[in-house]
Image (spheres, coloured by chain):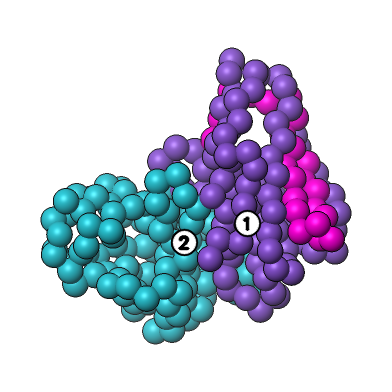
């Protein structure tokens, strides 16, 4: 079953604005990951946050994790047209688990 | 550096025909290998994963099968395709420590 659920399903913003995408999950996790997918291509890993971390940064990306609310958010600052893509969260339930459960994704459109 | 190759990129097959999709990984040894399927506008569904040669775990019962004849080769097969098998198939690999997934560029399968 799909554990992660992203919100919103679609987001359209102007270039230069910030984009925030949210993800909720149902069971306890070992880590949560965010991936990006350009249309018709494979997914690319962006960032991983472990269950004992609350915030992580990578370039223009900022990820937060709230295990009490079983939620995570991905913030892209100063968006660019090249950020247009679908973004997925994926959760791994345990350290020994091979199952990485993906949500349905948020489709982000950045208008130049 | 590690690379993953997946082919073909697109495939149109009639109902009842066989299927063989191939995926190979270079630049790493003993990877975990995965087959995912992505329906239009949906998240990713894990179909099979493998932690070693000849070791295949199935997540979803269906008319598809997977094989790992060599350490870095993963094959997705079907003896008789159904209309419902249409979708975007993605191969991925990760390290044995369950590090993030690295995806191929996918195969768009249309069953007519």
State how many labels appear.
2
In terms of secondary structure, where does tag 1 sit? loop
> Which chain's residue wears label 2?
B
Which chain does the residue under circle 1 lie in?
Answer: A
Q: Which residue is mark 2?
A: B45
Indicate which disc residue A4 carries: 1
The circle on residue B106 is none
In the image, residue B83 above or below residue A93: above
Residue occupying the point 28% across, 54% down: B86
Percent from the top left, x then y, of residue A75? 74, 37
- At numbered mark 2, what does the secondary structure look like: helix, strand or loop? strand
Colour displayed for chain B in the image of the structure? cyan
In the image, which residues are magenta?
Answer: A62-85
Q: Relative to residue B69, is residue B81 drawn left or right?
A: left
Asked which quadrant contains residue A92, the reply is: bottom right
**Residue B29 place in picture, x, y as percent:** 51, 72
Q: Counting other residues with Cα less than 10 Å from the Cα at mark 1, is it few (<14), some (14-19), or many (20 or more)?
A: many
């Amino acid at each position: 079953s799909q554990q992660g659920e992203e919100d919103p399903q679609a987001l359209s913003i102007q270039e230069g604005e910030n984009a925030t995408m949210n993800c909720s999950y149902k069971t306890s996790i070992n880590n949560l990951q965010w991936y990006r997918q350009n249309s018709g291509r494979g997914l690319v890993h962006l960032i991983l946050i472990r269950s004992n971390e609350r915030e992580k940064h990578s370039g223009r990306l900022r990820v937060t994790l709230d295990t009490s609310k079983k939620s995570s958010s991905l913030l892209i600052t100063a968006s660019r047209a090249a950020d247009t893509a679908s973004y997925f969260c994926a959760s791994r339930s345990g350290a020994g688990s091979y199952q990485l459960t993906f949500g349905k994704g948020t489709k982000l459109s950045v208008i130049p | 550096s590690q690379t993953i190759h997946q082919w073909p990129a697109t495939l149109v097959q009639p109902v009842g025909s066989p299927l063989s999709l191939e995926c190979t990984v270079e630049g790493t040894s003993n990877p975990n290998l995965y087959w995912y399927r992505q329906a239009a506008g949906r998240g990713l569904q894990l179909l099979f994963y493998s932690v070693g040669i000849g070791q295949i775990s199935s997540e979803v019962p269906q008319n598809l099968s997977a094989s790992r004849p060599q350490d870095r080769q993963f094959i997705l097969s079907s003896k008789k395709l159904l209309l419902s098998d249409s979708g975007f198939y993605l191969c991925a690999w990760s390290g044995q420590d369950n590090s993030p997934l690295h995806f191929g560029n996918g195969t768009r399968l249309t069953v007519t």
